[in-house]
Structure formats: structure tokens, C-alpha cells
Image (cartoon, helix red, strand yellow):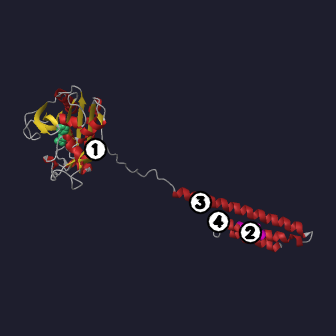
Amino acid sequence: MKEKLEQIRREALEAFDPASAATVQDLEALRVKYLGKKGELTNVLKMMGKLSAEERPVIGQMANEVREALTAALEERRKALAAAALDHRLAAEAVDVTIPGKQHHLGHRHPMYIALDELKDIFVGMGFTVLDGPEVELAEYNFDKLNAGEGHPSRDWSDTFYFDTDSRVMLRSQTSPMQVRAMETMELPIRIIAPGRVYRKDEVDATHSPMFHQVEGMVIDKGVTMADLKGTLNTVVEQLYGKGTKTRFRPHHFPFTEPSCEMDVQCHKCGGVGCATCKGEGWIEMLGAGMIHPKVLKMAGIDPEVYSGWAFGIGLERTAMRRFKIADLRLIFENDERFLEQF
Ligand code: PHE
């Protein structure tokens, strides 16, 4: 039995060598093999009963020594493996703090939305509510309820995007249907602006796009007059383009306003003398406006004998172009970073 114990010790210590016990799992298998309940050492101890009384303590002591030696060797090897595993992880997860970081490119508001935010701020400051409305609109709201019935030229297939053959559903060609939607849903008096996309069958060029943005504005109350319209718009223009900026109102026609007008702003470039920016005019067209037609009020269930109102519609791209001196409308939609970075 002595020889057997010696053999176990030799074999086991050899087996705990890094070559054969390369992993924690290897080591556990070896522990079971030599020190486990059915392990080799236990097997030897089970035969102790067959020994003589003199031999038993000697072999017993030796067996304990072997067990201690194996346990100690096993523990040592386990620690070495754990340390190696830790080293490995530290190396694998090492962070080189000297490598230059990845630059994050932080964007900013699009120039057109900067212009819109400025407009919103001005109107909200005057007590207006900002409304959002559908781009896919009923012709009834885009035309009929705005006093542009059957046969009105703007309803033509070559002017308007329809979804159906009987021309009932369309991409709105103006934000003016929001006037009607506000009249139908809001309590009087009403003060709203409604920005959003509109669509027309236009070819793309430096000043046109089949999709562009408008901001609709409307006030309805008792005793509202054209003077309120002019006063409000003059205030807005001065806030946008600086104190003393001059405007002029020219007669115009829209089916849903009466009287109607267009408002021009004195050219910011030449101060009204005439230059390339204003095409020699001295003035730049800015928006359409007018007093809401009594028929439109009536169709929305508002008594034109009691209430009156005004409305305007302003092109947002053109406002941004003037605000930031952008020469070509296409730049606003192309989203070339070299362009956008400048604002
Ligand atoms: N909707 C008109 C257009 O697109 C602008 C407008 C709005 C005119 C409100 C008068 C009142 O040209």
C-alpha cells in the first residue's frame, strides 16, 4: 500500500502540472479523480481495514500526508490559474486612454426651422396659438369652404395633386384650410398660426419647389379691421428684419379674403433704391393676406355681422432665404452639410 500511495502522489503531482491542468475544468476533473469520494486516494483508504494494527497508523499518517500534499498542490495550481485568467481579462479589456477619441459631430437646427422658430416666438408673444394640420386634405377644406368652388382655376389637375379620380382627397395646396379647421373647432375669439408643408405641381427651380412650407395666420374677433392686420404684420416685420423696416400693401385677389392684398418688404439690400436682390423693384413680395370673406365665416357657422377677421399666408422658405441671404431655394432641401454648417 505504501507503494500505491507513493504512486498516487507522484502521478497526481505530475498531473497538476500546467501542461495537463490548463484550465479550471481540468483541475476539477483531477481533484475528483484523486481526492473525490470515489477517487484513488479514497479507494486506498477503504482497504485500510485489511491492514495489521501496526501498519495501520503508519499508512494512515502517510495517506494524510499525501492528501495534504495533493490538496496544497491543487490549491496552488488553482490560484495560478485564477491569476492567469485575471491577467488575460485585464489584457483583453485594457483601454488605451492615449488613443484620440472619436469626434462626435453635433448638428443644429435647419436654417428654415430657425426662421420658423423666430416667427413662432413673435406670434406666441402676441398671444397666438400654434396649430398643426393635415397635409392630406379634403378638397372641401382646401377649396370649397374657402370660397373656391367647382371651376376655380386652382382646382385644375395641372395645379393640384389628387389621390382619387373624383378630386376629393388631395395634398393641400395651401395652409389656408387650417383657417376653416380652426373656425370649426375653436372657441371665438381665435388667434392662430399654422405652419406646415404644402404641395403644388411646380417645376423645381431657384425659387420653386413642388413641396414647400407656409405659415398661415388668422385672427377672428369682434371689430377686427384691416388696420389690425397691417399693425400686426408691421410689428412682425420689424421684429424679423429690424426697427424701421418699411412695408407696403398692394391690392390682390384671393377667393377667401375681401379685400385682399399682398405685402412687400422694402429691400434689405438696397433700402428701396433697386438692386439685383429685389430685381430693381426696391421691394420684395412677402405674403398674401386680407380680411376673411363673409361667405367663409358664414360657411363655418360664424356670423359676419358680429365677427370679422383677417388672415395671411407666408412662404417659409422665402422668409428663411431673406433672413439668411440664401440665393437658391434648392439649397434648403438638398441638406448638403457644407451648406447647413454655415448657420
Ligand atoms: N393661401 C394663399 C396662398 O397660398 C395665401 C393667403 C393666406 C392669402 C391667407 C390670404 C389669406 O397664396
Dot 1: element: loop
Numbered label attached to residue 110: 1
The answer for how far apart the CA atoms under marks 1 and 2 are is 74 Å
Numbered label attached to residue 25: 4
Using residue 101 as the reference point, say whether residue 121 is left or right of it: left
Residue furthest right in the image: 53
Image quadrant containing the N terminus: bottom right
* Magenta stretch in the rendered image: 31-41
Q: Position of residue 317 (x, y in %)?
A: 21, 43
Dot 2: element: helix
Label 4 sits on what residue type?
Gln
Quadrant hosting residue 318: top left
Numbered label attached to residue 85: 3
Numbered label attached to residue 34: 2
Dot 3: element: helix
Residue at 22%, 33% (x, y): give it: 240
| Mark 1 or 4, nearer chain start | 4
Check the image and report above or below for 155 versus 18.
above
Task: Answer yes or no: disc 3 within 8 Å of ligand 1.
Answer: no
Residue at 59%, 60% (x, y): give it: 85
Q: Nearer the viewer, mark 1 or mark 3?
A: 1
| Mark 2 or 3, nearer chain start | 2
For the image, the number of numbered tags is: 4
Using residue 216 as the reference point, say whether residue 86 is left or right of it: right
Label 2 sits on what residue type?
Tyr
The answer for how far apart the CA atoms under marks 2 and 3 are is 24 Å
The answer for how far apart the CA atoms under marks 1 and 3 are is 52 Å
Label 3 sits on what residue type?
Ala
